[in-house]
């Protein structure tokens, strides 16, 4: 059990950068989507 | 000659179903603990009855069907299909006993919706449901999203047998060489994110003024339903209840990670960071998210009802991402969604129908299959433009370079056609019962692709036949058909024999 926990923590340590990257990628998607919606919103508003 | 179903098949299936019953009984200890902590004795009794039922059935089956020979593929598929059906029935018992459901069918609908990570609900007066029952609803989402079999795999099954039922649960990614170690890895990723995600959500809720214990409970529930793309929430208003843009952003992160393949998680966790950029499935997912979002936005042109760009973005993108990843969280009322322009609704329907990545917790046709069709089309076009004698190969990157072959495309095509037929069948049934075609299609796709967004059709007043059909859609959609087809064949053969 102890061995397993140590192995898990070892993997987690290695994966911390991975987790950080994984957390950033949905944010990038959201920001890009926001920019698209902003462009559409502004163009719609200007045509009104 | 196709082998006939024998008595051995029934013995093997009964033995493993006995194990599933026992596993389902054991997991219900968790809501009992919640009941004790919150001093909800009536709820504790409900779960106690349910545990006794599960353990009794499990013990009887295990006693009368001792472990026979090794499991074969056909038996594995039948076990998976039946496990999900049995899980629905026994897990509905404590829900029904809570008194928040009009009939047992509604409770079954709710539990299948949770296990299949759909998120359509028929519960009455959710805001006054006990914490234990509410926790159980979300725990079912977590178990279903991971896979009921995946829960049992870690504890109860042997190596060879494990693989045969693991595949039956619509998972074919062997992240690690052994299916039990793969199951353990999936649990490790999910538990790590469970801790990170729940605390992040709870922190945001505390920042917005929710007391500590309440924030932790809501954070935990929202994470379990969000990561497994189920879309249940502890309050009837769903995410709208929190009125927080930051909270919505955190849920977007969770659901996008939930809709990402565990293979990609494994690669990134083991230091292959570029995989996130290079994986063919992630690329297709990004592409389809942006394309369907543009369709939704174009749908609103000339029909702009939002006063500012942030509110425009919050309301449109949240429903889209919720539909695409299959989570079904919503920050608007279903009556508001029903008034969206038709093109915007079509955009969400397409996103829901496509779904997330393979071997993730998301439902739908899956972006992988879509990408496969694109690559196959590209290969055919190239074939036509090169001399007849040339051999054309097309590759995609999914953890490694894979060359597409006709069998791969054929299987993907069969499953995609099954999904489309399932979507249409629900839409036709809705139309038959007097609902409009587009709302019926929306609701049917939402059920079959395990999304959970609703335009208001899913309601206790819905005809019982529609409830049953939606249960079937959720079940078949989650297991990707083959296990269900084999189960139906098994039942027909058994009845014919008698």
Image (spheres, coloured by chain):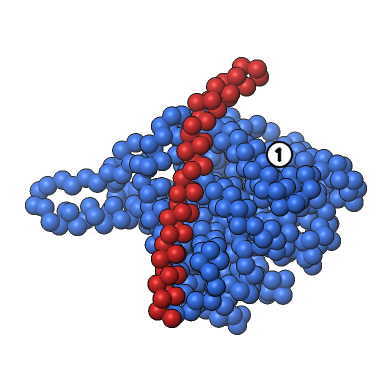
On the question of residue B1 being in view, the answer is yes
Q: Of B235 and B491, which appears nearest the observer?
A: B235
Please give the count of numbered marks on the rendered protein. Answer: 1
Can residue B470 be seen?
Answer: no
Who's red, chain-wise? A
Give x and y (percent) for residue B88. Answer: 69, 53
Subunit of mark 1?
A: B
Which residue is more in the foreground, B470 or B246?
B246
Toward the top, the furthest residue is A3
Residue found at x 62% / y 22%? A5
State the residue at coordinates (41%, 41%): B276
Residue B86 left/right relative to A25: right
Image coords of residue B120 (percent x, y) = 64, 62
Q: Position of residue B87 (x, y in %)?
A: 69, 49
The residue lying at 58 percent from left, 72 percent from top is B337
Q: Colour of chain B?
A: blue
Determine the secondary structure under disc 1. helix
- Residue B148 to residue B385: above or below: above
């Amino acid at each position: 059990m102890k061995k397993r926990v140590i192995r898990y923590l070892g993997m987690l340590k290695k994966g911390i950068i991975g987790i950080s990257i994984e957390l950033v990628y949905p944010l990038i998607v959201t920001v890009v989507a926001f920019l698209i919606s902003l462009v559409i919103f502004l163009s719609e508003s200007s045509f009104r | 000659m196709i082998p006939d179903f024998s008595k051995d098949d029934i013995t093997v299936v009964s033995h493993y179903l006995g194990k599933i019953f026992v596993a389902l009984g054991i997991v219900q200890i968790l809501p009992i603990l919640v009941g004790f902590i919150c001093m909800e004795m009536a709820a504790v009794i409900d779960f106690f009855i349910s545990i006794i039922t599960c353990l009794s059935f499990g013990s009887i089956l295990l006693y009368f069907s001792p472990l026979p020979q090794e499991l074969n593929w056909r038996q594995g598929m039948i076990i998976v299909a039946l496990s999900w059906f049995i899980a629905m029935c026994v897990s509905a018992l404590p829900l029904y006993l809570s008194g928040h459901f009009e009939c047992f069918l509604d409770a079954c609908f709710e539990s299948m919706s949770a296990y299949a990570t759909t998120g359509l609900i028929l519960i009455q007066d959710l805001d006054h449901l006990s914490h234990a029952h509410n926790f159980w609803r979300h725990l079912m989402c977590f178990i279903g999203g991971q896979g009921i079999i995946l829960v049992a795999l870690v504890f109860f099954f042997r190596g060879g047998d494990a693989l045969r039922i693991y595949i039956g649960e619509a998972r074919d990614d062997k992240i690690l060489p052994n299916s039990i170690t793969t199951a353990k890895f999936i649990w490790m990723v999910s538990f790590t994110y469970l801790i990170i995600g729940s605390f992040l959500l709870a922190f945001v809720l505390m920042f917005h003024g929710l007391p500590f214990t309440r924030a932790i409970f809501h954070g935990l529930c929202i994470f379990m339903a969000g990561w497994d793309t189920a879309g249940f929430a502890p309050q009837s208003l769903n995410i709208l209840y929190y009125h927080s843009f930051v909270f919505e952003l955190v849920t977007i992160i969770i659901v996008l990670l939930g809709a990402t393949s565990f293979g990609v998680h494994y690669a990134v966790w083991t230091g292959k960071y570029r995989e996130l950029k290079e994986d063919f499935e992630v690329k297709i997912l990004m592409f389809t998210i942006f394309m369907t979002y543009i369709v939704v936005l174009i749908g609103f042109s000339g029909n702009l009802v939002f006063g500012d760009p942030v509110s425009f973005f919050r309301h449109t993108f949240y429903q889209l991402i919720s539909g695409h990843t299959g989570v079904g969280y919503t920050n608007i009322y279903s009556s508001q969604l029903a008034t969206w322009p038709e093109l915007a609704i079509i955009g969400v329907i397409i996103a829901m129908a496509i779904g997330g990545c393979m071997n993730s917790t998301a439902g739908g046709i899956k972006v992988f299959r879509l990408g496969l069709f694109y690559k196959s089309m590209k290969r055919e076009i190239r074939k036509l433009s090169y001399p007849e004698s040339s051999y054309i190969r097309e590759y995609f990157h999914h953890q490694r370079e894979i060359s597409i072959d006709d069998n791969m495309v054929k299987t993907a095509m069969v499953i995609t056609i099954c999904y489309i037929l399932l979507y249409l069948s629900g839409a036709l049934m809705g139309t038959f019962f007097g609902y409009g075609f587009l709302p019926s299609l929306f609701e049917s796709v939402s059920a079959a692709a395990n999304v959970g967004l609703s335009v208001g059709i899913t309601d206790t007043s819905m005809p019982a036949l529609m409830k049953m059909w939606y249960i079937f859609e959720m079940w078949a959609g989650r297991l990707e058909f083959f296990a269900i087809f084999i189960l139906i064949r098994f039942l027909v053969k058994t009845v014919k024999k008698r």
